[in-house]
């Protein structure tokens, strides 16, 4: 089977490290090893043949994504939002406006680590926000929301090459409805905050978008376009992202919690989302950012 390993270190990828990865692949039983720059001193591709996908390490600061070479150009992206496509956890920032960020952030951290039931933890956190003015949501968007580096280029480049991008979040529509179009997503799926007379009423309206909804959204999008699972790329950081990561052709744990990282076949530990552009075979000259 033909694989490709993509090494990315936007700060300074040395050819010696690429050569060391080739040696490690040879030691693991790979053959037909061929290395080349994808972006000089930043990203390199190593093509090789092996009976199964190997797992090799790189130096600290360098990410490596190994996948079947023929599948690297993915046509469906399904991504988490908080701490993945944006740099914040929205509910934690809302809690800061309410003066209870430490309390809510602790619950968020435990839920993302898989120590708490996500649905129950979300209802608990939203309940603690009861009485917060609805206008604070707009304040949070304006003052604190930052798009993750590489997010716009990743989504818009995939779309420019005929792909589709779906943002599926355990967060809230008031954020995804802004973030999704701003980045370039074709569809957003998320939770609805209960709001009564301009104030958060402490509820989540309807069924919660949790782990199984994320997985179901990925499978639904594949079926609607008659695509195989191998055509999909799923990205997330929390335990509630694991089912969709496991169902995707390439599931990526992005600066993720330990449980999520352990479950994912690919991990981004050091770089930003542009690592995945390189993994899909796009050199910087091919990126779309407008």
Image (spheres, grey):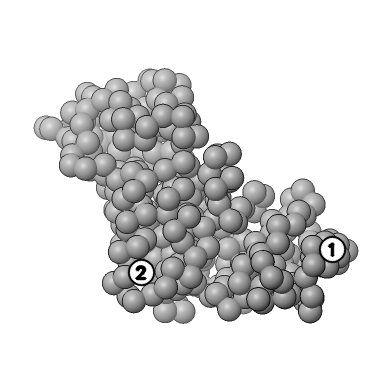
User: In the figure, is residue 22 to the left or right of 208?
Assistant: right
Per the image, the residue denoted by label 1 is 27
Secondary structure state at the residue bearing disc 2: helix
User: In the figure, is residue 229 to the left or right of 213?
Assistant: right
| Residue name at image x 48 percent, y 42 percent | 238
Asked whether residue 126 is in view, the answer is no
- Label count reads 2
Q: Marks 1 and 2: CB-CB under 8 Å?
A: no
In front: 233, or 264? 264
Q: Nearer the viewer, mark 1 or mark 2?
A: 1
Residue 70 placement (x, y as % from top left): 58, 78
| Residue name at image x 32 percent, y 75 percent | 225
**Residue lying furthest left:** 197
User: In the figure, is residue 23 to the left or right of 95?
Assistant: right
| Residue name at image x 57 percent, y 73 percent | 72
Q: Is residue 241 above or below residue 28?
A: above
What is the number of the mark on residue 60? none
Secondary structure state at the residue bearing disc 1: helix
| Residue name at image x 21 percent, y 43 percent | 207
Asked whether residue 278 is in view, the answer is yes
Q: Is residue 13 above or below residue 191?
A: below
Q: Residue 219's image quarter?
A: bottom left
Q: Residue 240's image quarter?
A: top left
Residue 220 placement (x, y as % from top left): 30, 64
Dot 1 or dot 2, earlier in sequence: 1
Residue 71 placement (x, y as % from top left): 55, 75
Q: Quadrant of the N terminus?
A: bottom right
User: In the figure, is residue 134 to the left or right of 264?
Assistant: left
Residue 100 placement (x, y as % from top left): 38, 20
In front: 31, or 161? 31
What is the number of the mark on residue 222? 2
Q: Residue 193's image quarter?
A: top left
């Amino acid at each position: 089977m033909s694989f490709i390993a993509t090494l990315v270190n936007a700060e300074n990828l040395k050819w010696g490290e690429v050569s060391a990865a080739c040696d490690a692949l040879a030691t693991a039983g790979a053959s037909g090893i061929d290395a080349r720059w994808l972006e000089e001193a930043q990203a390199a591709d190593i093509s090789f043949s092996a009976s199964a996908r190997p797992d090799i390490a790189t130096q600290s600061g360098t990410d490596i994504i190994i996948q079947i070479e023929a599948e690297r150009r993915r046509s469906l992206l399904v991504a988490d939002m908080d701490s993945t496509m944006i740099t914040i956890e929205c509910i934690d920032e809302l809690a800061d406006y309410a003066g209870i960020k430490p309390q809510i952030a602790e619950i968020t951290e435990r839920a993302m680590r898989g120590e708490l039931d996500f649905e129950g933890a979300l209802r608990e956190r939203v309940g603690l926000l009861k009485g917060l003015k609805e206008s604070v949501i707009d304040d949070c968007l304006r003052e604190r929301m930052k798009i993750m580096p590489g997010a716009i280029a990743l989504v818009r480049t995939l779309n420019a090459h005929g792909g589709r991008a779906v943002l599926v979040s355990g967060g809230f529509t008031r954020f995804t409805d802004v973030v999704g179009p701003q980045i370039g997503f074709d569809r957003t799926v998320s939770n609805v905050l209960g709001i009564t007379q301009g104030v958060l009423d402490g509820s989540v309206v309807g069924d919660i978008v949790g782990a199984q909804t994320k997985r179901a959204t990925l499978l639904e999008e594949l079926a609607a376009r008659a695509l195989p699972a191998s055509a999909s790329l799923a990205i997330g950081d929390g335990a509630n992202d694991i089912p969709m990561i496991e169902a995707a052709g390439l599931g990526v744990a992005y600066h993720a919690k330990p449980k999520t990282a352990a479950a994912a076949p690919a991990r981004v530990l050091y770089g930003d989302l542009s690592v995945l552009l390189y993994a899909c075979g796009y050199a910087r000259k091919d990126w779309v950012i407008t």
